[in-house]
Image: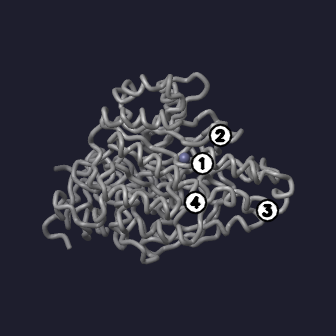
């Protein structure tokens, strides 16, 4: 077969195992894996002394989102350039209906944000914010190629909140259509009460941004996860807990999976590398995100959950606000625009603190950043692994070369970073998206607007990917090529 491009001599991580050799690309697809592919007529990308890993999927992203009285600062141009530099080749954003919008309107609005700007491939989770109006529109969205839906257990003031009736009813429909419901799990009534009790001028003066973690004790998340799990168990509808931040959450998920509840959990990389001690800092308010950063013991439990299997995916919940936007708080923590930049540092943080930190193997990392998210979100086998027939989405990273995180040198529109000054390996030297080189020598070279919307079919999601033990066991369906080391 005539190959257009050969990625030569890298350490290639595949679902079948890791080998030193070549990846052959024909058109937009991976067409060959081998120890010394015939390079005649093909362009060559040298990957000697580098890892060649599947492009990362960040399945929890908010670009150009109207939220907290402003609009998040990374759009599809800056956000996807940032992603590419961090080896991200696919993202999933959340299409949210605003006043009077149908689910179709929400999808149309998000399509417009992405088209002509996105450097990488994308799709959306469809948010159900008004159950009575939206419930009969779900089936149409499945037919249109969307297979994941989202409900918020909080955010009444934004007009997004779902009650138990909506959660229960949506999960029944998820079971019927073979689709999945993503849930932001925090206990709204108790949370509102705790915020109200602390919302006094005296306490705000005394504690400042520390009131953010003080008003969100772990049980606020744990109770909501427990309740959502209950509805999943009762209906058989597939449930996905987004941005799980507590050890209690991991315990609940582990127990639920053990009794066969179809629930999957995601955490975000910031919950693995930061804790709520950052709120002691002068600029601590910058770190406000929702849910907030937790304690060191939660950080440890989430790493353990990644190894144990109850945490299946690492994402970012990217929702970028500049220093100027964050300054809107003026000492009242309830007015801080909540969210942080993340796409550009997902892979470097996970690689440096996970793989180089001795907490996970490179194969485990690829499972949590690429293979699992693709399978769970109905994007496999097209996305998520280096295998014959898959899209040629690759990140090529040096095993040890570090870059200092410096917001002024990054693609994100954020003028700060939670990780400013950190030394991280794992930035993409080269990123390949459907056969195109979009990052070369650590610089973005790909063309704006080349990314495509990814249509999905329900029922392809793979439950095996969330079972304990599924990590890093070579998959016999993807044999390592003969002759490769
Ligand atoms: Zn989010």
**Residue 207 numbered mark, or none:** 3
Tell me, for residue 319, which label it has, or none: 1
The foreground one among 131 and 440 is 131
- Distance CA(mark 2)–CA(mark 4): 24 Å
Which residue corresponds to mark 2?
A: 67
Neighbor class of circle 3 (other Cα within 10 Å; few <14, some 14-19, many 20+) is: some
- Determine the residue positioned at 71% across, 50% down: 195
Is label 1's Cβ within 8 Å of ligand 1? yes
Question: Which residue is the site of mark 4?
Answer: 218
Residue 130: horizontal and vertical position, in percent?
53, 28
Residue at x 54%, y 71% (from the top left corner): 297
In the foreground, 99 or 72 = 99
Element carrying mark 3: helix
* Residue 144: % across, % down: 37, 27
Between marks 1 and 4, how big is the CA–CA gap? 22 Å
Q: State how many labels appear.
A: 4
Q: Nearer the viewer, residue 315 or 207?
A: 207
């Amino acid at each position: 077969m005539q190959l257009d491009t050969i990625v030569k001599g890298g350490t290639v991580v595949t679902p079948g195992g890791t080998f030193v050799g070549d990846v052959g690309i024909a058109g937009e697809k991976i067409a060959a894996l081998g120890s010394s592919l015939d390079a005649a007529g093909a362009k060559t990308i040298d990957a000697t002394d580098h890892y060649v890993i599947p492009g990362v999927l960040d399945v929890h992203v908010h670009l150009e989102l109207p939220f907290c009285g402003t609009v998040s600062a990374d759009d599809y141009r800056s956000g996807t350039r940032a992603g590419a530099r961090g080896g991200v080749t696919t993202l999933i954003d959340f299409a949210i209906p605003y006043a009077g919008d149908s689910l179709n309107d929400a999808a149309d609005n998000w399509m417009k944000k992405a088209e002509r700007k996105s450097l990488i491939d994308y799709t959306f989770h469809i948010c159900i914010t008004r159950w009575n109006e939206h419930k009969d529109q779900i089936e149409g969205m499945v037919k249109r190629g969307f297979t994941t839906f989202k409900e918020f257990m909080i955010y009444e003031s934004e007009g997004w909140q779902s009650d138990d009736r909506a959660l229960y009813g949506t999960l029944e429909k998820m079971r019927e259509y073979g689709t999945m419901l993503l849930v932001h799990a925090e206990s709204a009534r108790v949370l509102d009460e705790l915020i109200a009790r602390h919302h006094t001028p005296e306490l705000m003066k005394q504690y400042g941004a520390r009131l953010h973690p003080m008003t969100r004790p772990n049980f606020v998340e744990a109770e909501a996860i427990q309740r959502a799990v209950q509805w999943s168990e009762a209906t058989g509808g597939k449930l996905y807990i987004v941005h799980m931040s507590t050890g209690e959450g991991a315990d609940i998920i582990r127990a639920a999976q053990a009794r066969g509840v179809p629930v999957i959990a995601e955490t975000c990389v910031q919950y693995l590398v930061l804790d709520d001690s950052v709120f002691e800092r002068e600029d601590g308010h910058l770190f406000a995100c929702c849910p907030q950063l937790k304690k060191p013991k939660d950080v440890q439990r989430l790493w353990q959950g990644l190894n144990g299997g109850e945490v299946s995916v690492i994402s970012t919940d990217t929702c970028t606000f500049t220093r100027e936007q964050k300054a809107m708080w003026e000492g009242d923590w309830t007015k801080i625009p909540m969210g942080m930049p993340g796409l550009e540092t997902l892979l470097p943080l996970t690689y440096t603190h996970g793989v180089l930190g001795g907490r996970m193997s490179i194969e485990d990392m690829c499972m949590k950043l690429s293979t699992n998210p693709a399978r769970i979100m109905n994007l496999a086998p097209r996305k998520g692994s280096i295998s014959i027939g898959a899209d040629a989405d690759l990140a090529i990273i040096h095993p040890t070369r570090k870059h200092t995180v410096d917001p002024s040198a990054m693609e994100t529109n954020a003028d700060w970073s939670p990780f400013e000054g950190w030394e991280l390996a794992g930035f993409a030297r080269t990123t390949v998206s459907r056969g195109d080189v979009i990052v070369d020598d650590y610089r973005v070279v790909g063309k704006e607007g080349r990314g495509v919307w990814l249509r999905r079919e329900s029922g392809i999601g793979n439950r095996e990917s969330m079972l304990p033990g599924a990590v890093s066991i070579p998959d016999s369906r993807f044999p390592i090529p003969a002759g490769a080391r």
